[in-house]
Amino acid sequence: MKKADRILVVDDDPELRKLLRDYLTDAGFVVDLAADGEEMRRVMRRESPDVVIMDLMLPGTDGLALTREIRAASNLPILMLSARGEEIDRVVGLEVGADDYLAKPFSPRELLARLRALLRRAQGPPAAEHPEGIEFGPYRLDVAARRLLRAGVDVDLSSAEFDLLKVFAERPGRVLSRDVLIDLLKGYERDPFDRTIDIRVGRLRRKIEPDPTSPVFVRTVRGEGYLFNPRGDRS
């Protein structure tokens, strides 16, 4: 029998914490609660959550700083919440390492759908897919194990960064528009004014490009989208 996924909710609103605990428990999750960063750290020393739901506005250390702290230590999926819902909040949250973003107020059903999408991406595809891995430049992408290796050493990628790289690596030489990428990255919200894809590409480039300011693997095709060049050359 599969062990229940564990969700850590970090939010200073006691009513929202209770609502999320009750709803997610009914949905089959194990739920831990924290009202601030100190409590979050205590829970994470004791338990191993599968996803963190992080409020942006928290007393003491805010959600952005806590997201940076988690991301510096692990690739744990993070769903960020914000009462403001402005694009700048979403952009900053994703830039510091959140995997997805949801503006308050939200429906519990939408939150549940986002959580399940994050868990699916973190758990990866069946082992039979790409058993030999995908090689490009000095890298080997092990799809089954959700690992990126360079000379046998793991490259630290978040779940969202891995998913984006997999989409690119499976479609070498094709120009992929932002709309196509959003469709391929199932579970992400579509917004015509959203910079989500650009932010994710920027984060991925910082991990795999020799010079992220002059990328050779993930190239920008002006006015069209992005193209993955597995050779890593400039031809």
Image (cartoon, rainbow, N blue to C red):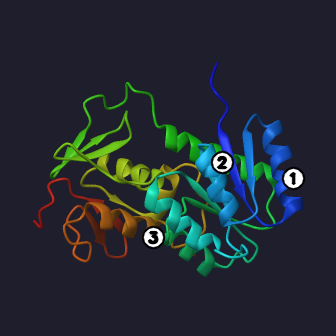
Q: Residue 168 appears at what percent x and percent y? A: 33, 52
Report whether residue 192 is seen. Answer: no
Q: Is residue 210 above or below residue 130?
A: below
Query: Which residue, given by chain and number where applicable, does mark 2 sit on?
Result: 115
Marking on residue 112: none
Number of disc labels: 3
Q: Quadrant of the C terminus?
A: bottom left
Q: Residues within 10 Å of mark 1 (few under 14, many from 20)?
A: few
Q: Is residue 111 left or right of residue 192?
A: right
Report whether residue 222 is seen. Answer: yes
Query: Which residue, given by chain and number where applicable, does mark 1 sit on?
Result: 19
Q: Is residue 114 above or below residue 25?
A: below
Please name the amino acid that badge 1 sits on.
Leu
Please name the amino acid that badge 3 sits on.
Ile
Q: Residues within 10 Å of mark 3 (few under 14, many from 20)?
A: some
- What kind of element bears circle 3? helix
Residue drawn at x 51%, y 73% is: 195
Quick one: label 3 or label 1, which is nearer the N terminus?
A: 1
Query: Which residue, given by chain and number where applicable, does mark 3 sit on?
Result: 199
Residue drawn at x 74%, y 44% is: 31
Q: Quadrant of the N terminus?
A: top right
Q: Nearer the viewer, residue 171 or 143?
A: 143
Q: Is residue 105 left or right of residue 48?
A: right
Callout 1 touching callout 2 (CB < 8 Å): no
Please name the amino acid that badge 2 sits on.
Leu
Give the mark toward the camera: 3 or 1.
1
Residue 54 figure quarter: bottom right
- What kind of element bears circle 2? helix
Quick one: label 2 or label 3, which is nearer the N terminus?
A: 2
Q: Residue 73 appears at what percent x and percent y? A: 45, 57
